[in-house]
Image (cartoon, rainbow, N blue to C red):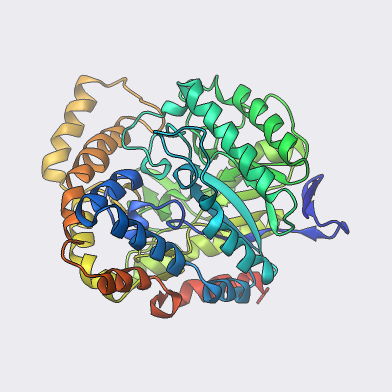
Amino acid sequence: MLHVSGTQLVADDNTPVRLRGVGLGGWMNMENFITGYPANESSMRRAVRSVLGEERAEVFFDRLLASFFTERDADLLAGLGMNCVRIPVNYRHWESDDRPFEIDPQGFRHLDRVIGLLGERGVYSVIDLHALPGSQNQHWHSDNPTHVAGFWQHRHFQDRAVHLWEVIADHYRDHPWVAGYNPVNEPGDLTGKVIGPFYDRLVKAVRSADPRHILFLDGNTYATDFSIFREMYENAVFVLHDYALAGFAHGGPYPGYTRGEWCDRDELERAFARRSRFQRETGTPLWVGEFGPVYTGNPGVDAQRYQILRDQLEIYDGHGAGWSLWTYKDVGLQGLVHAAGPYLDRFGDFIAKKRRLGVDRWGSTMEESADVLAPLHTLIETEFPGWEPYPWGARYQTDDLIRHILMAQALLPEYAELFRGLDDGELTALADSFLLDRCVRRRPLLDLLSDNLKGR
């Protein structure tokens, strides 16, 4: 079982272990750009249930969980040289909003299976609660249908999260291949006043259930602000996220300017130095919980994105930092592998429409539907020049409200209708499109990672 010793993670025999691997995004916490649906997960599931019915929808989603990660996936990651998978999960697998505090043990079924598969191959798991009751941040990836992080406004949601973590920690307290718990992904506490006391309470509760596993704690404002920590917890890693601006869908050339900001290797290193300052000053381990560029299909642009990744990995190596690349498997934007076959045949045109409208924040260039939205952005800038809403300012907030919430939610019925009339075999074929043997491998990315991990 791993534990923190100074700036390192070490095994029980004090052998240093640097966790390097990938995030299993889109699996037990589904995301719109990863599997191609619009809006947020719970809204999507509700729309699909309205077409398929409760029972058939549950069969489909369970099959998707089974196919998304199997022995073959574990073999691939271990073969690349990875020793860690960060596993995002949604609280809804264990608890429903209409029956709070009632835990469904079936929520552990697939998670136990995958942690077991990875452990058999010497790969650790970090359990990441990516979506908390009430939503801990302002965006889709916390299963938030709005732009309000209600988690920080209501003690009820916080009580439920603490209770769920007591259950999870008790369940895995003796598991040697669980590296630890990442209890709050990318928190977005608008005031910055609630999160510190909440972490104090959460740490105490988890330690009571499981005194040995590492806690991986994200800073506020999406794992970038560590001023909220009021004390240094024992056996804890303070997790930073390190996305490069030039690597986003709206990123410019590399090296070059993105939205007026220069980005090259030196700037990547300066950004990492800023984001990791707290860890270095406190003498705690360096671990990048998320990072990684997105890919466009344009060979020239993607070559630049691979260079961003190569430079970041070299920087992390130079500082002895562990990392978890985002993300393993999707429908073509960012994954090491991506689905093909019946799923893309069925949803390909719909995904193209989403791309044209820019309704997935992660895949948007911020220029789609410019003839409609540009005048609105100009209006906001002119009439409200001092408006800087949390977390990223007026331009992003306007896009979030109009493009990524309003327009995305308007697409939900269209997505759900694509399930209508499918028989059980066709639903199975859709889910099985995510089996590794039926996926396309992003070979340059796999080779880049293998070369880094194996020191070639």
Q: In this view, does 276 lie above or below 150?
A: below
The residue furthest bottom is: 437
Q: In this view, does 98 lie above or below 35?
A: above
Name the spot of residue 442 as percent of width and height, x first: 43, 74
366 and 315: which one is in front? 366
Q: In which quarter of the image is the N terminus?
A: bottom right
Query: For this view, does 124 lie left or right of residue 333?
Result: right
Query: For this view, does 45 lie left or right of residue 220?
Result: left
Query: For this view, does 172 lie left or right of residue 382?
Result: right
Q: Is residue 327 above or below residue 187?
A: below
Query: Which quadrant of the structure image shows residue 149?
Result: top left
Name the spot of residue 283 as percent of width and height, x first: 77, 40
Q: Which residue is drawn at 34% across and 55% down?
A: 33
Query: Which quadrant of the structure image shows residue 195?
Result: top right
Name the spot of residue 329 as percent of width and height, x first: 44, 65
Name the spot of residue 331 as percent of width and height, x first: 34, 65
